[in-house]
Image: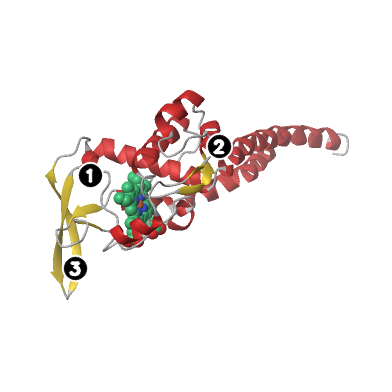
Amino acid sequence: MKKLLGLLFIVLIPFGAVASGGSNENLDTVHIDLSDTKSLQRGARTFVNYCLSCHGASYMRYERMAKDLKISDSLLRENLMFAADKPGELMMTTMPAEGAKQWFGVVPPDLSVTARYRRPDWIYTYLRSFYIDESSPTGWDNLVFPNVAMPNVLYRWQGGRIANFSESDGNKHFEGFEQLQPGEMTQEEFDLAIQDLTNFMVYLAEPAKLVRYRIGLWVIIFMVIFTIFAYFLYKEYWRDVR
Ligand code: HEC
């Protein structure tokens, strides 16, 4: 029996390795769960309503997203397709690149694979780190992306905050945010909404992961069952020898 436990342990090692991998930057940690379809659906709704006006996600088609996230055709057409006529279309932004460059000084980048190079924790922290800055062209600045050209588009949800800094040795130290105007959401609700949105952006960056997750689970179940069989087979073979 000890041997059986030992074998099971070896089978399960990769899980521990994945679970303990993380970033050591000064970012808040986000809980990503691609098996939480409801969370992905809420994230998709926020993304289509608040982000697609400036950013594209031009590697993704509406119908693929609907299929992966179990969104019905009617819901897709009525609530999620403001910027397209047909479900087969790519998720392009409606904003012309020329105009965007004029308005923001930069073209808002395509967000298809952002979660891959920026990492989920960064996106989660970034979207929750806007603060009012009268001296910036948009009226906003961001703690993890200083002088960012993007305004706080979720301002109505989060409300308006300023950031307090102290100075010592010529360095600015962040002391904390101060809420000036309340938002429509509480801090917890807002954090959850951004968690869902980040979850969705992780899916967006690698849709095949959803499929791999499902296959992965079956592989593990198979390996556990196989290990048990192998153990009994091993005992059977060696019974007469010893
Ligand atoms: C009004 C236009 C506008 C809207 C709406 C908008 N953004 Fe942006 N966003 C920008 C611009 C412009 C930049 C580029 C900032 C820069 O380079 O200074 C940007 C940058 C970003 C970045 C950083 C990308 C990178 O790797 O540098 C992320 C992430 C992002 N936006 C996410 C979002 C999300 C999520 C939403 C929806 C909640 C959203 N944006 C809505 C204009 C917008």
Query: What residue does disc 2 label?
Result: 88
> Looking at numbered disc 2 in the image, what kind of residue is underneath it?
Gly
Judge by depth and name the residue closer to the eye, 133 or 117. Answer: 133
Identify the residue at horizontal 49%, vertical 28% (top origin). 71
In the image, is the residue at mark 2 within 8 Å of ligand 1 by its beta carbon?
A: no
Q: Secondary structure at mark 1?
A: helix
Quadrant (top left/top right/bottom left/bottom right) for the N terminus: top right
Q: Earlier in the sequence, mark 3 or mark 2?
A: 2
**Real-space CA distance between mark 3 and mark 1, rounded to the nearest whole angstrom:** 25 Å
Q: Is residue 200 left or right of residue 60?
A: left
Residue for badge 1: 155
User: Looking at the image, is mark 3 or mark 1 earlier in the sequence?
Assistant: 1
**Mark on residue 172?**
3
Residue at 85 percent across and 36 percent down: it is: 237
Numbered disc in front, either 3 or 1: 1
Q: Viewed as shown, does residue 104 lie left or right of 206?
A: left
Mark pair 3, 2: CA separation: 49 Å
